[in-house]
Amino acid sequence: MQNNVLILDFGSQYTQLIARRVRELNIFCEIKPYNKLPDDLSEYKAVILSGSPHSVRAEDAPHPDLSGIKGKKPLLGVCYGAQYLAHFNGGNVEKSNTREYGRAKLAKIYEEDPFLKDIGIGSQVWMSHADTIKSLPDNSILLCSTHDVENAAFKFNGEDTYGIQFHPEVYHSTDGKQILENFLVNIAKVEQTWTPAAFVETTVAGLKAKIGNEKVILGLSGGVDSSVAAVLLNKAIGKNLHCIFVNNGLLRKNEFEDVLHQYKDMGLNVKGVDASARFLDALEGESDPESKRKTIGRVFIEVFDDESHLVDNAKWLAQGTIYPDVIESVSATGGPSATIKSHHNVGGLPDFMKLKVVEPLKMLFKDEVRRVGKSMGLEPNLLGRHPFPGPGLAIRILGDITREKVAILQEVDHIFIKGLKDWGLYDQVWQAGAMLLPVNSVGVMGDERTYEKCVALRAVESTDGMTADWVNLPYEFLQKTSNDIINKVPGVNRVVYDISSKPPATIEWE
């Protein structure tokens, strides 16, 4: 795989969106912390500096050594990156007196520079900064302005070094992708060679070299990520791949049997392990979301450790970890980004488990995983399956977990998901599920007072899980679904629909 573009992470949650936009141009990129520059920069054709929650005016501001980059390679600073280039090269950065967040429109453009090719007056951009560049750095020229931000973009004379105070990576910047293409393709001359087929070819070759003739155990979930990871590994090592599908007691209704049936025709060596009692016993009395995640992760590892001993000379544990899992657990690169929540398949293995970890998808976003799967011929119904959290229904049951609660939520979820499919809505939704709330509410059934559970339905649209909007499902569908749930699931007398977007609300409730 060609590491064509280097993105230096200064801690912005938008850093990974920069990577997504670059990859949409069929250009591979990788993210490194600003304070861990690669020793060898020769393989990179361009460098991008991300935004940051920090201020360049602060004493502890991120301050990398760019002497091997600036003026020697095409360089683009975004938001903090632009302010950094200005502040440390003779410009002046101050706290902004006006609010510089949200949508803005370009009001002045220097059209002669290829950086702004095909970008017109009135193009919408997205601002998100508390500081602003009051005066440009030495030996630079102004490229564009908005009504409120005079120095919205600039370029150093005699260099392919650019700075922009807005964020081209977010969807709100309508021509952001074009700006990135102008910089990477037209100015930096980066070749657009990174495709799903190229990823498969280089990843399979890398897996062969890394694993050799050793045996690998893979935890299948029935979802897109683990399935694509399994097919990649199967291409690389064949019979040395041993797939295990664990029933943790927190799957959807009939999912254990359905998933095992699904894998029958895929040529994978799959073993089903019913460890539901083991997981549910370990979760007894746990109500804290992080504790539940960590408990499930611990038992998951224990089950796989047991199973690994049944595979003679197994050396590796493969996981379907993808980029958003890593991003939300820790910084994507060990850098300064903030932790959102832990994921049960992120963070390595305990010392007692002697398996090495291999994660062939850990640099891909969900939509990229689907494209890779499609290129390898996976069935559309598998690739179109909604994401389902590793901890399963445990993080959709708020509070403690009991077998009775799991059974209730399985029935509710089954009615909701089946309804989406029957109404032709399933493929319009990126992820959907039901939450069992830790509250009872008063109701009336058959002239009798009830005091039973409340469930919340959630359906969102997204491309990568980093941001999401709630789906405006038809009222008639919601009405029928609510009626079906209340009439068919004992113990539930109220249904609500979650209309929160991410951010600020995460997709899952825990």
Image (spheres, rainbow, N blue to C red):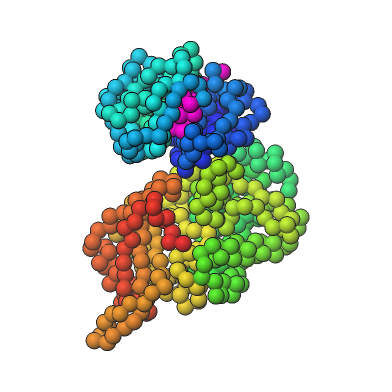
Determine if residue 373 is in view: no
Residue 356 placement (x, y as % from top left): 70, 50
Front residue (pair 66, 318): 66
Residue 465, placed above or below residue 443? above
Residue 74 placement (x, y as % from top left): 51, 21
Front residue (pair 258, 292): 292
83 part of magenta stretch: yes
Horizontal placement of 276 versus 207: left or right? left
Residue at image x 33%, y 25%? 150
Residue 226 placement (x, y as % from top left): 55, 52
Q: Magenta segment range?
A: 72-87
Residue at image x 74%, y 60%? 352
- The part of the image, by quadrant, that contains residue 271 is bottom right
Residue at image x 62%, y 52%? 347
Q: In which quarter of the image is the N terminus?
A: top right
Residue at image x 67%, y 55%? 349
